[in-house]
Image: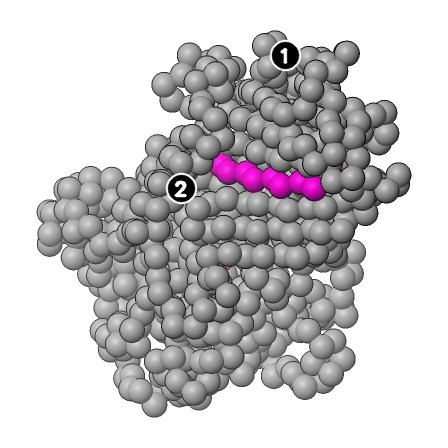
């Protein structure tokens, strides 16, 4: 078993979406799902290409309301390439029988290969080998090389290469009631073996330009040979016709350039794409530079496992992380989308999931973590405005972030089980700001860069600290934070209280105390700057006096958790089997998770994950609480028994935390964390985009001693 290869040996429509996501190729600037070039979106296959940071907002009517949704745009498809023999059907899903259908992702080289033998309805057998890359060397280039061999026939072969701007965002079934037509066609052109397509996004008005140069070698001239074009506004193709003889090899190379009007150092997106494609070398030349770039990247990011199967998964997860957070990201204004550039789940938004990636990325690719923090810093004005609008000072970062940093969390979400649209309060996860602050600190620890702390890193820390200082209210000798949500999204309020949010979520409060300590550390290192003495006093007081509740000798996930009911886990398991999405199950039953002691994912245990057992101990004793290893073990056991792991992040956290606190119990979570995406454990979600936070979290698990 070669741990650098991910191989699929058949054509399995039921797994196609998952395989497309897992064989996505990308370079940090853009990524393309591993869809077949001869296919279009048909319910089984879903070609998708996404450019980092390229969003567009559309409005839809849902459940009687107008809602705006900003999507990471599925840009025009650069892949289309197909052929036909004589005047028969074009090669497409359903027109041939697959005798061999092998797909090999080479993660070391960043190359996806398809090996096909197909038989058409006349019994003609054709062999195809198709390799593609998205250049890690030049992030605007991609290439597709197809070798076609007629095994048992001779005849006229027509090859069509196209750029398709008719695509829409329709990759997630749950969003299908919402607007998804983001592309407005502008123009196309075709001349001298090069085709080009220019479109723009509907409301953000980002121009997207593609240019493709297709060459064909082999075969003999045909009477109506040469190249013919079909250029429409939203679709452009060229077609070549040659006479081929049995056994003869035809090679078709398609080299593609992609630019948008957001790029730097260009005169215009269209001219930049045309120039790039004209200057790009052959597939072989591009491949050489591309694999050397990957070599360099792997030298910085490889993590070793003893077992070959584990190594393969580890390589795959790091591969996808690097394809999204590649060094090219350092040149861009983009965050780390929770689901990569691999699909449309969560609309390509940026959440707190970066917190799982920073420990891995910061020591290896600090230019990338710096860029991710710059993405946040550029959106400070928006976060400040959001804080002011809500009645606070400082900066309130959005739970879901896209183009300009406003809150992108949808106000309504669909429960597919009940068919009901429900109010979504997950924007109350104010702990997102704590994640940004944590990432600032990780970046500083990895780089030792005090200029960063004295500069924009420190500005982020202070502005976030100001927000939490204002959010917290003094009650007696403690500081309380009311009306928020913790990482466990299954509790968005109390069963008997109308306004949403819970009080004194332990994760939020302990991390707030942690943040205050880090700000004080920062001030000790680089000076107070514009932080007033009054603020320093407030930060100091909060560092020592944040409220944390306990019950039964364990940390309470939030105030009042103790009073909630126990769920009859056994009966739910018996009735439903998979109970990861207990929120949907309970809502469909007319009930609510708010009534029960259940958690979607690690919440209190996130404190162990981020701070370590010792760090958590220090934080709690620093807050004046008694804490010891017995309480730690009891807390871990308590929440372990009440968590249903409805997020891929949960297994990762549990695997790591249990390894320290309950070593014997860690293994099943490690296995689950490894299988999360490769086996699509959340039932169909990987097809809509990989889970980058969980992937990064797995890499971190293996680098730990
Ligand atoms: C998890 C969040 C996560 C989001 C994006 C949700 O299911 O509960 O913690 O940030 O997915 O990955």
Furthest toward the right, the residue is: 122
Q: Residues within 10 Å of mark 1 (few under 14, many from 20)?
A: many
> Which numbered disc covers residue 190?
1
**Is residue 533 or residue 103 the one in the foreground?**
103
Check disc 2: other Cα within 10 Å, few if <14, some if 14-19, many if 20+. some
Mark 2, residue position: 291
Left or right of residue 223: residue 289: left
Residue positioned 70% across, 56% down in the render:
10
The numbered mark, 1 or 2, whose residue comes first in the sequence reads 1
Tell me if residue 132 is in the magenta stretch: yes
Identify the residue at image location x=67%, y=73%. 579
Residue 71 screen position, x and y as percent: 59, 37
Query: Mark 1 against mark 2, which lies toward the viewer?
Result: 2
The residue positioned 44% from the left and 39% from the top of the image is 27
Viewed as shown, does residue 292 lie left or right of 678? left
Up the image or down, 671 lies above or below 78; here it is: below
The rendered magenta stretch, by its main secondary structure, is classed as: strand
* Span colored in magenta: 126-134
Note whether residue 642 is visible: yes
Residue 702 numbered tag: none
Residue 624 found in image quarter: bottom left
Contact? badges 1 and 2 (CB < 8 Å): no
Task: From the top left corner, tell me how far across and down residue 685 is, in percent.
Answer: 63, 57
| Secondary structure found at label 1 | strand
Residue drawn at (55%, 80%) of the image: 642
Q: Residue 426: horizontal and vertical position, in percent?
A: 55, 55
Q: Residue furthest top?
A: 191
In the rendered image, the quadrant that contains the C terminus is bottom left
């Amino acid at each position: 078993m070669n741990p650098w290869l991910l191989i699929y040996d058949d054509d399995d429509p039921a797994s196609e979406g998952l395989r497309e996501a897992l064989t996505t190729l990308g370079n940090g600037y853009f990524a393309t799902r591993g869809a077949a070039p001869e296919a279009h979106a048909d319910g089984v296959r879903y070609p998708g290409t996404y450019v980092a940071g390229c969003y567009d907002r559309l409005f839809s009517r849902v459940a009687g309301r107008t809602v705006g949704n900003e999507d990471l745009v599925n840009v025009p498809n650069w892949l289309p390439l197909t052929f036909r023999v004589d005047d028969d059907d074009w090669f497409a899903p359903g027109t041939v029988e697959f005798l061999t259908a092998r797909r090999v992702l080479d993660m070391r080289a960043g190359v996806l290969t398809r090996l096909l033998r197909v038989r058409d309805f006349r019994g003609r057998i054709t062999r195809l080998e198709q390799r593609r890359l998205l250049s890690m060397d030049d992030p605007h280039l991609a290439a597709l090389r197809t070798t076609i061999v007629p095994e048992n026939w001779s005849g006229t072969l027509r090859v069509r290469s196209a750029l398709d701007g008719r695509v829409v965002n329709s990759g997630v079934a749950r969003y299908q009631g919402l607007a998804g037509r983001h592309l407005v066609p502008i123009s196309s052109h075709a001349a001298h073996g090069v085709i080009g397509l220019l479109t723009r996004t509907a409301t953000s008005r980002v121009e997207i330009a593609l240019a493709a140069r297709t060459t064909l070698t082999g075969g003999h001239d045909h009477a109506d040979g040469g190249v013919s074009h079909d250029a429409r506004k939203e679709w452009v193709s060229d077609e070549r016709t040659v006479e081929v003889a049995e056994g003869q090899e035809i090679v078709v190379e398609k080299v593609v350039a992609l630019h948008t009007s957001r790029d730097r150092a260009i005169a215009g997106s269209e001219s930049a794409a045309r120039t790039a494609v004209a200057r790009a070398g052959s597939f072989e030349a591009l491949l050489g530079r591309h694999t050397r770039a990957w070599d360099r990247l792997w030298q910085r990011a490889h993590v070793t496992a003893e077992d070959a199967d584990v190594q393969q998964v580890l390589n795959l997860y790091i591969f996808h992380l690097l394809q999204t957070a590649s060094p090219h990201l350092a040149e861009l204004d983009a965050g780390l989308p929770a689901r990569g550039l691999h699909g449309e789940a969560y609309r390509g938004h940026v959440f707190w999931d970066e917190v799982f990636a920073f420990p891995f990325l910061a020591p290896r690719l600090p230019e990338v973590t710096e860029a991710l923090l710059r993405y946040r810093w550029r959106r400070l004005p928006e976060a400040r405005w959001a804080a002011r609008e809500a009645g606070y000072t400082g900066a309130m970062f959005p739970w879901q972030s896209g183009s300009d940093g406003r809150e992108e969390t949808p106000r309504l979400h669909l429960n597919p089980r009940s068919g009901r649209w429900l109010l979504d309060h997950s924007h109350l996860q104010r702990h997102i700001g704590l994640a940004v602050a944590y990432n600032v600190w990780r970046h500083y620890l990895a780089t030792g860069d005090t200029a960063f702390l004295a500069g924009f890193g420190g500005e982020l820390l202070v502005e976030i600290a100001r927000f939490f200082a204002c959010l917290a209210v003094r009650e007696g000798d403690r500081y309380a934070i009311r009306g928020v949500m913790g990482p466990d999204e299954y509790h968005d309020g109390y069963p008997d209280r109308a306004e949403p949010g819970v009080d004194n979520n332990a994760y939020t409060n302990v991390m707030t105390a942690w943040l205050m300590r880090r700000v004080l550390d920062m001030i000790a290192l680089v000076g107070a700057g514009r932080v007033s003495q009054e603020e320093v006093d407030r930060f100091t007081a909060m560092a020592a006096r944040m409220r944390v509740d306990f019950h039964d000798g364990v940390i309470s996930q939030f105030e009042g958790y103790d009073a909630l009911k126990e769920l009859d886990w056994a009966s739910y398991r018996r009735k439903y089997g998979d109970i990861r999405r207990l929120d949907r199950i309970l809502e469909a039953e007319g009930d609510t998770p708010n009534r029960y002691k259940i958690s979607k994912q690690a919440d209190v245990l996130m404190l162990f994950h981020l701070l370590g057992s010792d760090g958590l101990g220090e934080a709690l004793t620093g807050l004046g609480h008694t804490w010891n290893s017995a309480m730690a073990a009891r807390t871990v056991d308590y929440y372990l028994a009440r968590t249903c792991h409805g997020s891929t992040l949960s297994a990762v956290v549990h695997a790591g935390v249990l390894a320290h606190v309950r070593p014997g119990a860690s293994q099943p979570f490690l296995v689950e964390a490894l299988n999360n995406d490769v086996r699509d454990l959340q039932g169909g979600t990987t097809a809509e985009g990989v889970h980058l936070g969980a992937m990064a979290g797995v890499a971190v698990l293996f680098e730990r001693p």
